[in-house]
Each structure stands twice: as C-alpha cells, then as structure tokens.
Amino acid sequence: MDPLKALADAERKPYWLDSPAKPEPLPRLFGNTTAGLAVVGGGFSGLWTALMAKERDPSLDVVLLEGKKIGWAASGRNGGFAMATLTHGIANGLERWPEEIALLEHMGLTNLDELGETVARYGIDCGYERTGELHVATEPWQLAEMHQSVEVARELGVRFDVLDQDQVRAEVNSPTYVGGHWERDGCAMLDPARLAWGLRQACLSLGVRVHERTPVRHMRDAGTHMELLTPHGTVRAQKVALGTGVFQPLLRRLRHFLVPVYDYALMTEPLSREQLASVGWHNRQGVGDSANQFHYYRLTSDNRILWGGYDAVYYNGGRIKPEYEQRDETFVKLAEHFFTTFPQLSGLRFTHRWGGVIDTCSRFSAFYGTAHGGRLAYAAGYTGMGVGATRFGANVMLDLLGGEPTERTGLRMVREKPLPFPPEPVRSAGIQMTRWSIAQADLHQGRRNLWLRTLDKMGLGFDS
Ligand SMILES: Cc1cc2nc3c(=O)[nH]c(=O)nc-3n(C[C@H](O)[C@H](O)[C@H](O)COP(=O)(O)OP(=O)(O)OC[C@H]3O[C@@H](n4cnc5c(N)ncnc54)[C@H](O)[C@@H]3O)c2cc1C
C-alpha cells in the first residue's frame, strides 16, 4: 500500500480532540481572588491534583488555572495507554531503585486500580478497558532481552504470560512477530481527551473553580502566600501545585531537567468486520514492540487503530512550536511500518495525523519537589508515560504540600532528582548523538555503542 495514498485524506489534528464531546472552555479569570490551593496546568497532572485535593479535604478552596484549554496538550493527544509502571518500565526502575522496585510496582498497580475506580465512580465515559499490554518482539535479539525482564517481573509478582510466535500471532496477527509476552494487569486503554474532560467535570462537581485560557505569567512569593499573575487577574494562594508539563516552567530550576521531545501518531478509519477478523485482536490489548525505537498501537472503541511512536524528535534549541506537531517525513515512515506490520490491511486509510510534546527527563520517570518554603510543589518529567503516573504524581504533590512524611514522600525515587541536561548547544549535540546511536543499536541486534554505554553508566538517557 502506498503510504502517501493512505495518508492523503488524513486530517492534521489529534483524533481524540476532534470530538463532539469536546466541552466549551470555562471562563477566564477576571479580577483578583484567593485560594487555599492553586493548581497551575489543566492536563492530567493538574486535574488529578485538583480533584484529589478536594477529595482529601472538601472544605479546601481549590482553583485550577489552565493557559489554553483543558487537555489540549499531551494529555488529550496521547496513545491512551494508562500504565501501572511509575518508573518507565521495570527495567529502568530496577536499574535506578533496586531496593524500592517491589514497592514501586505495588504502588503503581494500586494507582491504576484507583484510577479505574475513579473513572467508574464519576461515570467518566472514556472507553476505559483494563486489557493489559502485549509486548511483541520483531527480532530474535529483542526476545532475549524481553525474557530477562519477564524473569524479574515474575519475581516481583507481576503477571506476565510468555507467548511463542504462534501464540502471539493468535492474539494479534502480524507476520513480523517472533514472540512476545502479555502483561495482563499492567495497563488500561482509554480515550485520553474524554478522560481529561471527565476529570474537569468531576473537579467542577466537587467545587473546584476552573479557569481556562488563563496562563500564569508570573509567580511571586509574598512571604505568607504565593501570588499568581494572569493577564486579567491575580490569585493569592496559600499553596501552589505546578502541573505545567514541559512548558516554560514558572520555577526556573526545572528547565535544567526537562527537554521537549516530539512524538507522532496516526489514526486509521474504523476497520470493517472482515478487516478486524484478519488481525484477530479479540483481547484488545495495547501493543508495543520492543526495539529501542518502538511503535505503540491499539484499538479504539469503534475499532480504529492508533499507530504511533518510533521517531522521538528533539528540535535543536529545544523550542516548543505548533508547527512541530506536524512532520510528514515521520507520518510516511509510520504509515510504511503500519502496512509492514499488517499487510492484510492494505487499502485502509488514515483519518488523522498529529504530534505532541513530551516532558522528557534524563531518568525517564517523573521527579518531584517543593520550593518557596514548602508552599509550592511540582511533578514533571513523565517522559511519555504519564497517563497513569500523573495520578501518582498528583498524590505526591499533595503529600508534599501537606508537610507530613508519607510512604510516597519517603521513596528515594521521590527524594532524588534526575541528572540535569547540559546547556545548549551541547544539549542538542548530545541528544542528536544519542538518537543516532539508538537507531544504530536497532540495526545491530540491540548492541549499544560506546556513547550509549557511557550514558548508561552515568544514569543519563534520552527517550520518549
Ligand atoms: C503523542 C503522544 C503520545 C503519548 N502516549 C502516551 C501513552 O500512551 N501513555 C502514557 O502514559 N503517556 C503517553 N504520553 C505522555 C502523556 O501524555 C503525558 O505524560 C501526560 O499527559 C502529561 O500530563 P501533564 O498534565 O503533566 O502535561 P500536559 O498534558 O502537557 O499539561 C500541561 C498543561 O499545563 C498548561 N500550562 C503550562 N504552563 C502554564 C502556565 N504558566 N499557566 C497555565 N497553564 C499552563 C498547559 O497549557 C497544559 O495544558 C504521550 C504523549 C504524546 C505527546
């Protein structure tokens, strides 16, 4: 199938946000106000923080300020894989926090259970399905690496089913698969934009004041409280939680730890019954392949296929620009890979193509902290795995603002910061070298060159 033909009619916007369920934006903030807690950012991070702050203390006066619209950024345009992992996978967590990994896995599963319970409790219609994730290998060397992590996972009590070539193809039928495993509990599929809009509604129902199109331009420590300055009003808040993702941080120190990395995705038209039968996919798992440059893909409730990943693009200089959300070179590559994976779907067309920016940090999993004498908390750096983990991060921020030690705030993962990225232009040079090396590793049976091995030793990395 000619990828250009398949892409010809694809709209240049995120599929999930292009929905009749999209709510009208809530009013801007006009005038001055006060709050017990001001949450900045209306992605998952901010929404979970505002919601759970109210659940913890219904009398707390909470205001949420979103610069554009709720869920417009990464939260409303991602793959919709809500993962249990808090550490960007077991292998990364084991490498960094071996003594905590069992607890972290347990906390991650509990977090995902509670996420599902919240979705049910507030009746959020976001197509939530706890189908797990199928990790597929397309080369024998990936299989060997996969088996190692399965062993570790099993020792930690995580439910992994190892599948040989026939078994994995019986789940999802692609001639490219050589084997895989099914992580049954570790992942749920959902419609991320509908989750964000549903969380907005849940916040409103508990009395959170939500203002959209209200960017916080400056933040000031006024001694007894914080002041947040927006274009048409000011919030005097006792406490502040920052859920601003990768965008220009209000706290300067965060800029050393975060780089914007663009990730891209395609959505197909709905599959016919015959097309779906040709792929199987009865158990509707999310699927990820196991190269360093990996694809992720899944079914939607109306049986489209979302197909994303592979290219993780850092634009030199580290700017965030709307035009970076479209990259034809990547879309063509993704379409080619799609038809290599599913040749039986030749003729299928894509309806949407889009990209989004990811808050990447050098340890691949979120970091947390406080500032201004404990009046402000932040969580950022989810590195492409924040759909589930932002809920955990929101709980960490609320614990930190509460000031009392908790099991979460005692974690080394929470207390430690990632290594900062070097300043530009070394930053761009280093990241492009890393991207090139990762692509080379995939071409050479996963063998990591000296550059990657050195970064591994330093605990530094680059991922989406
Ligand atoms: C294409 C793509 C695919 C992905 N797929 C997955 C996936 O399948 N599974 C997964 O777990 N993760 C995935 N991710 C990552 C996931 O989407 C993010 O980790 C998560 O959404 C981060 O949420 P957030 O609230 O921290 O950030 P964001 O969603 O970026 O929200 C931050 C918000 O803060 C607002 N803001 C920033 N500064 C200010 C300010 N000064 N004043 C007011 N508002 C401000 C912004 O406008 C924005 O709305 C993907 C990301 C992308 C881009």
Image: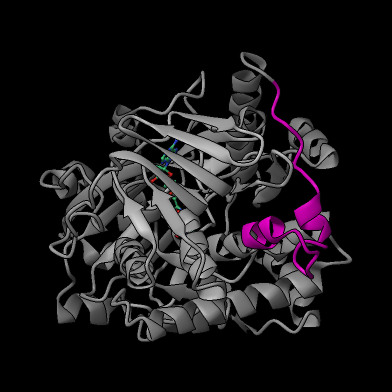
Q: How is the image coloured?
A: one colour
Q: Nearer the viewer, residue 173 or 254?
A: 254
The residue depicted at 65 percent of the width and 66 percent of the height is 143
Image height check: is 202 above or below 221? below
Q: Position of residue 272 (x, y in %)?
A: 14, 76
Reply yes or no: does residue 418 show up in magenta.
Answer: yes
Q: Position of residue 311 (x, y in %)?
A: 46, 41
The quadrant in which residue 321 appears is: top left
**Residue under the image location 28 percent in, 71 percent down:** 300
Q: Quadrant of residue 185?
A: bottom right
Direction from residue 157 to residue 273 in the image, left or right? left
Quarter occupied by the C terminus: top right
Residue in the image at 19% along x and 59% along y: 22
Judge left or right: residue 349 versus residue 293. left
Q: Is residue 351 left or right of residue 402?
A: left
Residue at image coords 15%, 59%: 347
Q: Is residue 165 visible?
A: no
Q: Which range is magenta?
A: 396-422
In the rendered image of this protein, does residue 234 appear above or below residue 252? below
Q: Nearer the viewer, residue 101 or 416?
A: 416
Which one is nearer the viewer's eye here, 147 or 308? 308
Relative image position of residue 6 (x, y in whole percent):
17, 50
Quick check: is 3 in the magenta stretch? no
